[in-house]
Amino acid sequence: MAANLAKAGFEVSGWNRTALRPSAEAASAGGVRLCARIEDAVRDAAFVATCVGDVVDVEAVLLGAGGVSSYAAPGSLVIDFSTIGPVAARRVASALGSRGLRFLDAPVTGGDVGAMAATLTIMVGGSPSDFDDAGPLLAAVGRRAVMCGPTGAGQSIKLCNQVLAALHMVALTEALALANAQGVNAELVVDVCTTGAAGSWALEKLGPRVLRRDFAPGFMIKHLLKDLRLVLEMPPAENFSAMFGTQLARELFEKVARLEQCDESCGGELGTQALTLAYEAG
C-alpha cells in the first residue's frame, strides 16, 4: 500500500515495527523512504496512514509514548487501515482529537493481492470533509472507498464483511467435504457452482486453492480469529444478540489453529482456506 502511494506520486516516508520484514523491503523498493523512528516518518506529514494487527497495536503506535500523536503536526489526518472494531475506533479518534489530530477509520478488504494491485475496498468512518481530503490517497491504494458514516462506521461494515467471509469459507469447505464424501469430483463444485446462485468470491478464488491443498496465507487464520473476536466482543444491540454463524465459524477456525499435526507457527498462520483441515480432522 505504501509503495502504491509512492507510485501515485506521493512523497512517502514509512516506519515498520520490524525493520527487515519483506513488506518493508518491498515498500523501499517501491519508492518509500524508510525511517528508523516514528518521529522521522510523521513529523512533516499532512497524512499519516497506519495498518497493524490489533487494538493494542494501533493504540501503541498512535497514542503510546513515542507514537504518532507525540510527533504529528496539529491538524494532520490519521487514516487507520487496521481492523479494530467501532468501539476502539471511537476511543482512538477521541484521544487523537484531544491532541489536535483528525482521524478516519478505514479498514480494507481484498487481501494481500488487493493490497499489491491497489484494488482494495476501503470502508471509511469519520468526517465527510476528512474523507474528501483523503480521497486521492484512498484512490491510490484501493479500487473503491465508501464513506460509511461517522467514526466507527467503517469498522462496523468491516466486521460485517468478516462475518460474511468467515461463513463463506465454512460453506465452501463443507461443500467440498460433502462432494468428497459422496465420491464425486470436488472440482465440479468450483466449476459448476461458481456460476450459479451459490457463487462467491471465496468459491471462485479460494476453492481452487483448497483443491490444490495450497494453504499459503492471503489472509491468516489468526487475523480472522481476531476479527471474529471483535465481532463477539461488541456491545449487544437492541433486539439483536444472536451470532450463531459467527460462533460456529470461530469454533472451526480455532480447531485448525490448534491442530496437533501443525508445528508451532503453522495453524494460525495458514490461510483461511485451511479451514478444510477442520473437516478432515473430524
Image (cartoon, helix red, strand yellow):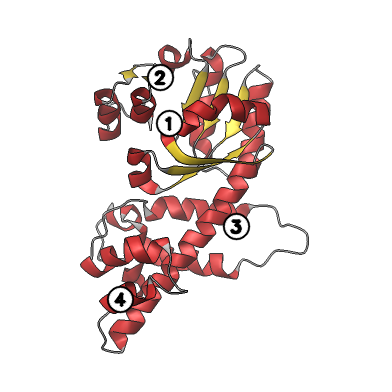
Q: Nearer the viewer, mark 2 or mark 3?
A: 2
Residue hosting label 2: 10
Where residue 175 appears, as percent x and y from the top left, is: 38, 78
Most distant residue in the bottom direction: 182
At label 1, which amino acid type do we have? Ala
Where residue 67 appears, as percent x and y from the top left, is: 50, 21
Q: Residue at x 27, y 32 (%)?
A: 21
* 192 over 134 or under it: above or below: below
At label 4, which amino acid type do we have? Glu
| Numbered badge on residue 232 | 3
Q: Residue at x 49, y 39 (%)?
A: 82
Q: Earlier in the sequence, mark 3 or mark 4?
A: 3
Q: Give the class, few, some or many, for how many residues have Cα within 10 Å of label 4's Cα (few <14, many ≥20).
A: few
At label 3, which amino acid type do we have? Leu
Estimate the spatial distance between the alpha carbons at disc 1 and disc 4, rounded to whole Å: 41 Å
Q: In this view of the protein, which residue sits in the foreground, 208 or 253?
A: 208
Q: Residue at x 39, y 62 (%)?
A: 202
At label 2, which amino acid type do we have? Phe
Where residue 110 appears, as percent x and y from the top left, is: 41, 48
Residue hosting label 4: 280
Q: Count the marks.
A: 4
| Numbered badge on residue 6 | none
